[in-house]
Image (cartoon, rainbow, N blue to C red):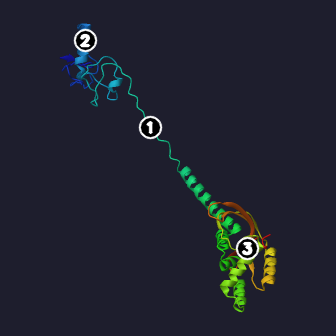
Amino acid sequence: MKKCNTCGADIDDNAIICNVCGAPQLAMDTKETASKPENQTQNDMGMGMNQYQVNPFMTGNQMPGAMNPGAVDSFGNPISSGYSRPAETYSYTPAPRKSGSAMKTIITIIVAAVVLVFALVAFKKFSGPSVKKYVENYYQAMGNLDGKAFISAAFPDEVVKSLEQQMANSYVGQDQMYSLLMKYIMSASGKSPTERVTYKNFKISGTKYARKSELDDFSDEFNSMFGSNIKVTSARTFDVSYKYSKDGNTWLDGKDKAVAYKVGGKWYIVTDLLGTAK
């Protein structure tokens, strides 16, 4: 039995409140502690942790002094046998996603695509369609000594029909007339009227576009020459270079000045071979 700290009544050794006056019994009996050896007192403190009043807000890492390894605090957390450094915790916070950056990239790509489309449209409108295939047809007909195909590649349908009508009124047949016409053109240009030539690797350079006033002059000159009534809507001058061979083995370089002119939605080609390309 121990004595109450306040009224001195006899109370149970494990009592934490006096059953007589109700006073809390927080302090240990100093006489009992003093009568025991120092080592025994420390052992009693370690073994009697259930009798020791523990601060419920203390964790095991915060409990000072040497404690019984099996002891726990009021929350059930183990109490360490000495002081240990509180556990360090680390947290990772990811960098905020820059949604605006992705949107800017998308907008930049869209704007660049739109600018490219407008640039291509403007270039096509300025330069007009390619006339390379018409050039190739012109030289192919000339190399094959095909008079009708050659004239059709060089002159509008109105002129060709006029020529065919004149042929029909002559004693010479149409095919023969085209052959004679082809021979005349080749001879006048210093080329063999009977020798076939193969052309390839066409390249166009130095293109110059005609102004509207020049188109009108071209139309008037053309109509005066052939007695036709055509209207040239577009024209350009350029240099055409190519490879040609008479035997299919020996390839030489060739170059002519050429004019491409548009009548009724179709392009026609003439070169200095005809004396009209300037």
3 or 1: tag closer to the N-terminus:
1
**Where's residue 202, x and y in %?**
66, 64
| Residue type (three-letter) at the residue carrying disc 3 | Met
**Where's residue 188, x and y in %?**
77, 74
Q: Residues within 10 Å of mark 3 (few under 14, many from 20)?
A: some
Residue 275, quarter of the rendered image = bottom right
Mark closer to the observer (2, 1) = 1
2 or 3: tag closer to the N-terminus:
2
**Where's residue 274, x and y in %?**
76, 74
Disc number at residue 147? none
The answer to whether residue 39 shows anywhere in this view is yes
Q: CA distance from mark 2 to mark 1?
A: 48 Å
Q: Residues within 10 Å of mark 2 (few under 14, many from 20)?
A: some
Q: Residue at x 23, y 15 (%)?
A: 44
Quickly name the residue at label 3.
Answer: 186
Disc number at residue 41? 2
| Residue type (three-letter) at the residue carrying disc 2 | Thr
Disc number at residue 92? 1
Would residue 238 be found to the left or right of residue 63 on screen?
Answer: right
